[in-house]
């Protein structure tokens, strides 16, 4: 009898694991392959964010491009808002951070620590296209890059 319940538990765990959403970190890296630098890169990032439908706002640093928060998803019991920070990194890279929050209909809110596939596509899809038009190429997911570095 114990074997039967062990088997049922193992099958249930496998089924639930297959239904779990794929999560990714709340950022994406881009390699700058066009000939831009300094203020020119910052202007390109502002233009890319604006073209993708984001509203730039003053940031803590003149090199960082921050955007205003806007709705990016809604369910029956909550809505999700997000803002972006486009940060030029040394070595010809730009990291786009997604600052997302889930707002409950009951009034609570919580930070979104990982992006689901749908949220990732709704937030990073348009900005990736806009950045690609300016010569910035999205790198694989951080997990993919880590696996490539260890092979």
Image: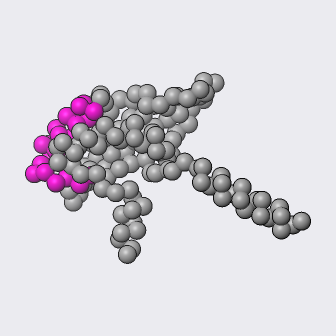
Residue 44 falls within the magenta-colored stretch: yes
For the point 36% across and 69% down, the residue is 148
Is residue 60 visible in the rendered image? The answer is: no
In which quarter of the view is residue 127 placed?
top left
Name the residue located 23 percent from the left edge and 39 percent from the top edge.
130
Region of the chain picked out in magenta, as a range: 30-52
Residue furthest to the right? 1
Image spot of residue 26 (x, y percent): 43, 47
Is residue 127 among what the camera can see? yes
Which quadrant of the figure contains the N terminus?
bottom right
Residue nearest the viewer, comparing 52 with 47: 52
x, y (%) of residue 120?
42, 42
In this view, the residue in front, 61 or 80, is 80
Q: Position of residue 100 (x, y in %)?
A: 46, 37
Using residue 99 as the reference point, say whether residue 66 is left or right of it: left
Q: Nearer the viewer, residue 141 or 49?
A: 141
Position of residue 54 in the picture relative to residue 136 (left or right):
right
Name, please, the residue furthest toward the left. Answer: 35
Residue at image location 35% in from the left, 41% down from the top: 124
């Amino acid at each position: 009898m114990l074997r039967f319940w062990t088997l049922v538990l193992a099958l249930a765990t496998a089924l639930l694991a297959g239904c779990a959403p794929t999560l990714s970190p709340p950022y994406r890296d881009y390699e700058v392959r066009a000939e831009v630098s300094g203020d020119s890169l910052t202007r390109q990032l502002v233009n890319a964010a604006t073209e993708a439908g984001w509203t730039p706002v003053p940031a803590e640093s003149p090199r960082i491009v921050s955007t205003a928060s806007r709705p990016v998803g809604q369910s029956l019991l909550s809505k999700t808002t997000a803002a972006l920070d486009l940060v030029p990194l040394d070595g010809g890279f730009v990291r786009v951070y997604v600052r997302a929050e889930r707002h409950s209909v009951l009034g609570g809110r919580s930070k979104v620590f990982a992006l689901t596939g749908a949220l990732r596509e709704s937030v990073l899809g348009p900005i990736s296209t806009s950045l690609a038009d300016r010569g910035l190429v999205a790198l694989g997911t951080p997990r993919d890059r880590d696996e490539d570095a260890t092979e």
